[in-house]
Image: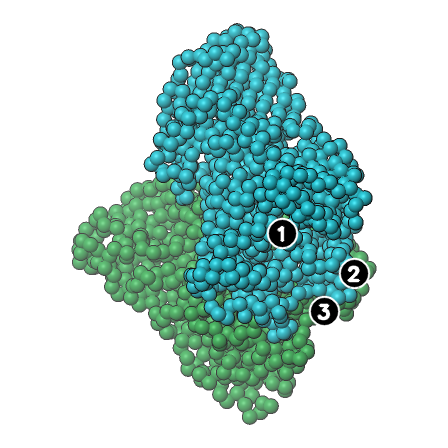
Chain colours: A green, B cyan
Amino acid sequence: MKNYIKADEWNIIEEGFDPHLNKISESIFSLGNGRMGQRANFEETYTGETLPGNYVAGVYYPDKTRVGWWKNGYPEYFAKVLNAANWVGIEVRIADEVLDLATAEVSEFKRVLNMHAGVLERTFTAKLKSGKTVKVKATRFCSIADDEVGAIRYSITPVNFDGKLTLSPFIDGDVKNQDSNYDEKFWTLVSDEIIGTEAYIKLRTKKTEFEVCTGSNIGLYKNSEKLDVKIAEIRKEKFIGQTLTLDVKANEEITLVKIAANLSSENYSKEALLKETKAVIAKATAKGFDTLLKEQKEAWATKWEESDIVIEGDVSAQQAIRFNIFQLFQTYTGKDDRLNIGPKGFTGEKYGGSTYWDTEAYCVPFYLATAPQEVSRNLLIYRHKQLGKAIENAAKLGFKDGAALYPMVTMNGEECHNEWEITFEEIHRNGAIAFAIYNYIRYTGDEAYLAEYGLEVLIGIARFWKQRVNWSSNKQQYVMLGVTGPNEYENNINNNWYTNLLATWCMKYAAEAAGIVKSQQPEKYTSLLESVNFKDHEFADWADIIEKMYYPEDQEKGIFLQQDGYLDKEQILVKDLPASDRPINQKWSWDRILRSCFIKQADVLQGLYFFEEDYDLETIKRNFDFYEPRTVHESSLSPCVHSILAAKLNDEARAYEFYLRTARLDLDDYNNDTEDGLHITSMAGTWMSVVEGFAGMRVRDGKLQFNPFLPTQWKSFAFTIGFRGATLKVNITENGISIKNNNDVDLEIGIRNQIYKLAGNTELEVDNAELV
Amino acid sequence: MKNYIKADEWNIIEEGFDPHLNKISESIFSLGNGRMGQRANFEETYTGETLPGNYVAGVYYPDKTRVGWWKNGYPEYFAKVLNAANWVGIEVRIADEVLDLATAEVSEFKRVLNMHAGVLERTFTAKLKSGKTVKVKATRFCSIADDEVGAIRYSITPVNFDGKLTLSPFIDGDVKNQDSNYDEKFWTLVSDEIIGTEAYIKLRTKKTEFEVCTGSNIGLYKNSEKLDVKIAEIRKEKFIGQTLTLDVKANEEITLVKIAANLSSENYSKEALLKETKAVIAKATAKGFDTLLKEQKEAWATKWEESDIVIEGDVSAQQAIRFNIFQLFQTYTGKDDRLNIGPKGFTGEKYGGSTYWDTEAYCVPFYLATAPQEVSRNLLIYRHKQLGKAIENAAKLGFKDGAALYPMVTMNGEECHNEWEITFEEIHRNGAIAFAIYNYIRYTGDEAYLAEYGLEVLIGIARFWKQRVNWSSNKQQYVMLGVTGPNEYENNINNNWYTNLLATWCMKYAAEAAGIVKSQQPEKYTSLLESVNFKDHEFADWADIIEKMYYPEDQEKGIFLQQDGYLDKEQILVKDLPASDRPINQKWSWDRILRSCFIKQADVLQGLYFFEEDYDLETIKRNFDFYEPRTVHESSLSPCVHSILAAKLNDEARAYEFYLRTARLDLDDYNNDTEDGLHITSMAGTWMSVVEGFAGMRVRDGKLQFNPFLPTQWKSFAFTIGFRGATLKVNITENGISIKNNNDVDLEIGIRNQIYKLAGNTELEVDNAELV
């Protein structure tokens, strides 16, 4: 755990330069706009420890992963988000010395990520070996107003010398993924071009043949006045740049503005890509840096109006929750239904930048409440688009007749993880995808989604479960063998309670959804069922399984069993583990972990969270009290579910304790892995802890419900959510809760067990005293 | 299945050249002498389909296998037996045409592997594109009399022309493993040298830094008369050769003799390697080809005297059983206790040439009966030498205090397989290693082995099991979770009956062995227990587990359960599977296989085979009748156990049917995979089917026992075994059994339920009529 980020309500601040922290800061100060992003690598040369990273959404490489033993159905590749062309680079030379913070004497170093504006700023003073000293101020952003554009303003002031200054802005496409399995480079050059201040490089990925054109236009200024300097071209392998040399005087500020664009063949024909990039560059250049910056600030201000959480009385918590919201919006804006949320967003290479069930289980609730409805709808449509591939995935494993198995990890719908115990067995993800449809409709009331997209997906998923269970003549019930639950610290287990429960729930919900579509759009219903070749007996098959499914439980303990053999394991509590054994995923062999009773993340409890209305508080409490002490929370997705359940169980202290475990996970480098990138999807879990946990927000019968408490460490907290046309400001203080409705929509709101009317453009205040 | 090998009692014969069969024949006609070996690649150039293969025992490469996700305790590499320098090559040119059977018109092609002599002979007539025709006769062997030496006699006769003939014998070290994970070559050149007719190349393996020096000496003859021809040197990358050009006349036979040697740094210092190779070459050259060949024939004759099986009335079965015996002795001679038996021997690359539990479970019984006692003893000592590594392997997984886990796959004692479900879980191999000690002592009576080597290994293994089980407070018994049994079509199962049984047996036997050592060599006992830091409570710990172990069974069906969840699986019989679904390991996804009830190889039945004396026939029959119909026998190690058990159950027809499944597995390319190499270890299983199955041979109370039957397809069968100083010829005819004792040792022999005396140098004949 580190603690070097300065507390501030709206800014992430690093003061002083510590090379050992650089890779961590590169992750924390990452920029993104949903379409592209990059780690906070320095513009100028840096020969110290760094993980260079520039990423373009949707552009991936299917890295070969087949080595040694392989079995039928194993995925053929592991998709990698590609490290793309670096457009932020500017080499700086003073006389013949390269400016490099690894060799210079650095002072007054400060890095600030202004989350309200979406801007990264870096200032420092560097004394070179020669004694020459310069001051630098670099300002950079990836525009969310125009998500193909990024811009840099790089100002350098000689402090104690007159002399020659050489600036070489460049675009470097000769980049490599650190996680390349075979140490291969993934890009080939298509074309490059330098035209005066402009430079363009078009690269193609091997195998997938995506093309990305990266362009830039530069402008040079002295004390704000435009300079006209001769430009020398630089060309190296997959690398283009321009060299500008000028004589500078002490205290004259020289500023290089670099406006860049990334366009991909996902959005343009390959033929038009270069031309379109030039057009984007021309338009952005015409606006100029200041206008682009203004647009960026305005766009972010709008986002914050829809999504901000204000915490009073705890600056550190305030900073953390905004950081989480900020990074989620940097990663996914919901504009493009082909994109999704990689667990590390645009901040690193790990997890391949691919889509996991994290999206449905953790991110959908966040976007439902904080962004326009189309954003979460697009996340759902993403899966609908991939239904055909999901049916293919299932067919590869031997399923048939339209059964769909969504992949555990994917870029394009095809499974691309490389562990059978995950790809074949961790099938609960299929349920999470169905649950997200339910959750979306519960929140938005958009039942029409079912006819348009949802039902088709639900039928494919229900068909999978139907084939995946089998009749046990031994038990005279249906069982589900050989699965991995959300607790990945057990593999190939039988009758994972959570998966069994999800499976029958999916069949129930698919049948219910069919009923809704049938009654609302009978023609659509008929044509849809025909198109998926639906057989009469299918509903009955599902009903039979729903009726006769086996769910493991222990009557005596009054708990659901994570799996058939769980109680045969040696029962030890996490508190009795020596500290030197933690985290067990670093200290123990995989063998030992698998055989232990220790749980990586909520499993039975994940089911109780999803389906809380079906269980009384006592049952939830018994299971919580049994499983939580056995849970090591070594997934960043674990604590939020525990926080929400603890809040539900009125254990406010523990709810807050679980919240703390992820609130500053990356800012404080809690797990010593922030340098690899940020835990983007778990950030949504932190948001859930506050909104679903502390504020106890739910949707029931089409109404928002709250069951709030105020953590004793805070003075108040407030958050903004959108709900069925209304934007609500919810404020929780020690006195009670107030909800301001900023729109014309009349609502009914539940607080604890009471329903209140909240007319459009009014505010509802409820004192603690009134709450039962 | 193919059927192109001509039936013959002592020879493997291929007539006519079919390029599509070449890779299969390269495997079948492989040569080896326990120290080195090679596939039956042609000496001359061949541009058709071929899998070049030359191998040197004990010389391996740790190929990188870590790709993508990896977890603590996963092995770092997958050891590969190396494709070593090719010393058999002789390029032949007629005028300017290269002799190449892929482009020539081939007639009178015949390949004969003389198993009695250990010699490969190949004759053919080839008409080149120019119309020039040559007759060739190539004779080759790897000497078992001097296992560093190999020799070739390559005779070529122009049929229809006079002209220039160029012969270029070479040693090619620029070879590659086809199964190289990263397409890397594994050898680097240390030095090379050509001195007249001699050539030497010394190569070093990357990473492991083994050195192998390969040398050759050539002689040229015309109609048996030595020729003195000018030699031109050839040098290419890791390749040396000599070119001899001469003018030939039609019908003059030109013969090139090439005597070669392979010496490795496993047996000599690296500095001395070249010098020693020269000495070996000098000695072998002095002997000459004919003497070397004579020694080879004599050495093989001796082997056959100790191990032959004679089958009357079925030439095809006769050929097959000799082929199996021959290949086993080509692979392992037992001279070196650092060597072992790779599942493909010297006939291919697959399975890395590494040691598996096949050795202990299947090969030890063969060598016990057919080779001097030291041969199987050396196989045992091999594991004793690796005890330290086995303790390290266990420690990597979290076991301690001297617990030993032998690897699933190894070259040097270190685990080098790359699937956690195998390395971590398929731990029954540890039991097979203990069982082999028991089996060795049961057969030989050599209890002194325990004090010297055996007990130390048994203690390490027992300690592992002690730590590997856990107390189930649920069952109030000890359980063993997360294992893979011999049936690798289930992974990570709980309470595999076979493994649970082996575990407690190992603890019982370790305690019993300790008692034997204590009473026979009390001082040795004390010092041994001290050296392994044995604690007083350990025997009691074992006894507690032995007493309270849980074994899954189904009372109603009267069967032992392969694992806790086996009866929850959908129960289908193999006979009800459509033919198009077989073999399931090619037709089904791994997911589907894992969830099915289908069994790859004997599992519960393997336990009933090992410990048959503990179970009544009815119990064995119930389990056999339950499991066999669910067994797909997709391991070549499966049918033999079934054959032996069927024989025990007096189901002679089925015993013979199971025998047939592996008897000609490779000769008839039953599984379409002979081209990859031969199934060496399963050949021992075929031997077991005959000797333990048909002849019903056992050792009980220190006496040999027979319970024979004659397959109706045969007239008689006879085999030779060594037993406690005696060499016995056992002959089973339709009339009864006769056993001839060729030594001075007096024995008692059990036949069915009767004990007979068999004095030294006498013969015992028992008619069927006498047998109860």
Q: Which residue is mark 1?
A: B702
Q: Of the residues shown, which amino acid type is indicated by label 1? A: Gly
Residue sitting nearer the eye, A77 or B475: B475
At 40% across and 16% down in the image, what residue appears? B231
- In this picture, is B302 found above or below B77? above
Q: Position of residue B271 (x, y in %)?
A: 33, 36
Q: Residue A134, can we see it?
A: no
Which residue is most to the bottom? A769
Estimate how packed mark 2 is, as few (under 14), some (14 to 19) or many (20 or more) residues with alpha carbons within 10 Å. some
Q: Position of residue B10 (x, y in %)?
A: 65, 29
Q: Of the residues shown, which amino acid type is indicated by label 3? A: Tyr
**Residue at disc 1, secondary structure:** loop
Residue sitting nearer the eye, B764 or B476: B764
Q: Which residue is mark 3?
A: A550
Q: Are marks 1 and 3 in contact (CB under 8 Å)?
A: no
Q: Residue B625, can we see it?
A: yes
At 73% across and 33% down in the image, what residue appears? B312
Tag on residue A538?
Answer: 2
The answer for how far apart the CA atoms under marks 2 and 1 are is: 65 Å
Q: Of the residues shown, which amino acid type is indicated by label 2? A: Glu
